[in-house]
Amino acid sequence: MKVLMLMFDSLNRHMLPPYGCDWVQASNFKRLAERAVTFDKSFVGSMPCMPARRELHTGRYNFLHRSWGPIEPFDDSMPEILKRNGIWSHLASDHYHYWEEGGCNYHTRFKTWEIARGQEGDPWMGDLDPDVPPANPRRPGAMERQDSVNRKYLRGETDFPQAKTVAMGLDFMRRNAACDKWFLQIETFDPHEPYFVPESFKKLYDYDYARFQDDWPAYGPAGDEALSKHYQMLNAALISMCDHHLGKVLDEMDRLDLWKDTMLIVNTDHGFLLGEHDWWGKCAMPFYNEVAWTPLFIWDPRQGVRGERRQSLVQTIDLPATILEYFGLPLPPDMLGKPLAETIKSDRPVREAGLFGIHGGQVNCTDGHYVYMRGHATPDNQPLYNYTLMPTHMRRTFEVEEMHKLEGLQEPFRFTKGCQTMKIRSGNDWGRKTHSLTQLFDIDRDPGQKTPVTDPAVEERMCRHLARLFQENDAPPEQYIRIGLNNL
């Protein structure tokens, strides 16, 4: 038995043909939907990149207890559990956040791993040439300059990190097709911004890309409708590139006859706003469906179900549980995600409701029919703490001044295996403005979330879900205060 996960970053559900998009050229996603189960109610948990990946390892939400960070010493890691039980786990990726301090120990949980360099501002090529032309003149920062330098060394399609990543994954598949008991995660940073994409994929669309020298949306209000259109077209071209490499994986599944004994999961961490709701990005704004409602496809050879859709509510935290169950391994007691075998087979539900959000932002709850966004109830979005034994942010450790905000050791949470954690005051500001609203949406009638609804009975029901899920996840007491659950 084997499992192959092909993971994309920031892959928009609403840009894929199996989810109703009629203009993005992505025939292999159609082919995938014919070979697998397509989930219609798949939602994120913790935002953004590394918080989502912590969920892929641990099967529990990250955002209630800390911001972006690495695997904690008390965490149960699905790839490591596989490794310890004689199942080879391998990562092939170009997702450069794995090699920063805020993601420093995810890849080492695998038995083996490979990397491809050059995505975004990856500190890759040391080139001091002052005349490197800026790829994005509107973004003059150091990371943007490094991105421009990196592009000098990505000359042909096979040089692109996504192409290298998939090639590494295909090599693993070929080497080990006749072997049993392996988990392969092929993970590409695409179609994450910046939208640097080979010309061959741009030519699939009738659009003049030269209108703007800009392929890197800022996270904030969308100030230009024409520029939003430009980003949409570039995103489409990059999705077509992702589709092309998905096709290579499907071809290899066919050629190696892996469908008979290999689970295939095709997923993402979250989506991205390309002008919808007048925003660009994924973090600075409320997590509308374009960000939170994700594509998910699973083929389970035990069930043999293909070409069908499922309506049960599922989340990122369910994927590690699904993989462990597939290999016949018990779930760790702290893993709250649920195996999806019976959902794949017969659409059996695994939860009534789920949480999603970012540390310090709105706490969102969905039952698959409504989305309830609950903003902060305190004027300064406090109290808020990071609980951690690994005090790092995205690219470096906490600053000395931040460590001065350490208020002592927190008594163990249920999932920390008896370990106390540092309790550090968080200045995370996501909730101060755009995450401060409380809104309710009926996503069955209004999937685009154009108009909030007022329904006290539904809001009360969603608040009960919130309170129950807070208890199940051993949420810190101040989270109840911050969003006003302590008054319910």
Image (cartoon, grey):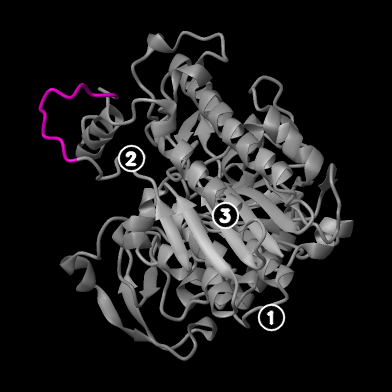
Residue located at (30% from left, 65% from top): 392
**Residue pointed to by mark 1:** 330
Q: Residue farthest to the right?
A: 346
Name the spot of residue 110 as percent of width and height, x first: 48, 67
Q: Pointers 2 and 3 in contact (CB under 8 A)?
A: no
The part of the chain drawn in magenta is: 126-135
Disc 3 from disc 1: Cα separation: 29 Å
Disc 1 on helix, strand or loop?
loop
Residue 352 percent across, percent down from the top left: 77, 63
Q: Where does residue 39 sit, x and y in percent of width and height?
A: 75, 48
Residue kind at label 1, given as amino acid type: Pro
Name the amino acid, label 2.
Answer: Gly
- For this orientation, the residue located farthest to the bottom is 418
Residue, disc 3? 175
Looking at the rendered structure, the kind of residue marked 3 is: Arg
Question: Quarter-wise, where is residue 152 in the image?
Answer: top left
Disc assigned to residue 157:
none
Give the secondary structure at mark 2.
loop
Q: Which mark is residue 118?
A: 2
Q: Main secondary structure of the magenta part?
A: loop
